[in-house]
Image (cartoon, rainbow, N blue to C red):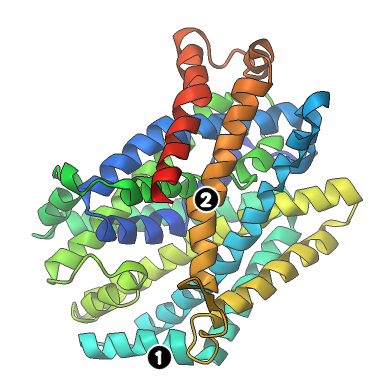
Amino acid sequence: MTRFSKTGYILSTAGSAIGLGGIWGFPYLVGQNGGFAFVLVFVLAFLIFGVSVFIVEMVFGRASGQNAVATFEQFAPHHLKFLRFGGLMIISGVLIFAFYVVVLGWLVHYLFLSITGLPKTLETTTQIWGGFVGQEIGWQMLWHFLVVALCAFVLNRGVKAGIEKLNLILMPMLLFIFLGLLGYSLAQDAFMDSFLFLFSPNFDKINAEVIVRAVGQAFFSLSLGVGVILTYSNSMPKGGNFVRFAVVIALLNFLFCLIAGLVIFTFIFGHGAEPTEGVGLVFISLPLIFANMGISGQIIAFLFFISLIFAGVTSAVSMLEPLNSYLIERFSMKRHFANFISIASAYILGIFALLSNTAAFSADLTFGGKNLFDWFVYLTSSFMLPLAGVFMCIYMGWILPKERVYAMLEGKLQGIYFKGWYFTIRFIAPIGILAAMINLI
């Protein structure tokens, strides 16, 4: 089995977690859901649910040494054979990849706009965004194809030469760019407005929808419930302290989310824009702000969109690796053939997701008040990922004997730390997640 190096494992797993969910999704969800109210619930969900389930998924992968489907087949007791289907969580990764690459295509388009010239009026930037997504099918299909082709190239090279090498290059570059953007933001008068928006108490805005979205975002931003962490942990370097790895990766992800929020809202408040734009925050408000900052804005826009693309690609490639691993191990497929099946499936779904936003096909691909793109986002982040987390907690906390779980941890979590974590995965995490989802329904 090809294994990551320690640095490669941390950066690759962090690269999967630190994606569009943290840098694109987190800020616009914060803006839509009351600033601090969302941040508070997100922090609690991240620390209580996210890190606990992260360790659960990591332990399953390390103990099994197999793909996600085979892992749950291996641990399923004879009288509970239906538990073997838990590995079907890898389907979530295909759906996430399908809409991820659509967004990445949009970002590539705006990267070129940052070079050729961003619109300088709200009317123009709104028209460009609406016209591009709603009318420019050809350009969207081109960017979509190029992004998918790049992901296919990386996945074809495998764990060591593809995924690890990509993250060893892009993750340090991403960190460097974002620290630079944070430094620039700190020098702006609006930075304090951004800080207060994220951290000034407003408990009255906390409701069931905010809680569910925050829990879903915690799972989404850590790539939980997809099988990615489990699959990557198969290739974890021997002798590594995986609990320490989990904490380091989680903290890196958490810091990126907060930095992204501080940077983006500094630009938003500094130019009198509204933080509640939703998905269009990155494509309407920020381009307008960058355009009116002159040459410096053009440079910042280029670095900003490059960083989003870097983050998105490192996450996107990870979403299909669980399915690739399953096809290779179960059916003895060559990697390039398994990759073709997974990429082709996600590519086709992505085309439908892309078309569902266009004026020509929106009506045919909209049902229940949401188009196909929105359904992919909603189902994965609000239901599939959290439910997979509940499943893994119940599996490890209630199905497997406590002694076996303790042994699987290899002494990396002992005493009061083990008792606290074990209590969390048995009671707090599954009950909290399910209660939030039931309130939303």
Quarter-wise, where is residue 324 in the image?
bottom right
Q: Is residue 223 visible?
A: no
Query: In the rendering, at what x and y percent does residue 399 appear?
Result: 67, 22
Q: What residue is shown with label 1?
A: 131
Give left or right: position of 385 versus 279: right
Near mark 2 (Cα within 10 A), the count class, few <14, some 14-19 or many ≥20, is some
Mark 2 or mark 1: which comes first in sequence? 1
**Image mark for residue 383:** 2
To which quarter of the image does residue 437 belong? Answer: top left
Q: The N terminus appears in which quarter of the rendering?
A: top right
Visible residue check, residue 345: yes
Q: Is residue 242 above or below residue 230?
A: above
Residue drawn at (49%, 53%) of the image? 381
* Total numbered badges shown on the rendered structure: 2
Decide which of 338, 429 is in the foreground and name it: 429
The image shows residue 351, relative to residue 198, as above or below, that is below
The residue lying toward the viewer, choosing from 258 and 280, is 280
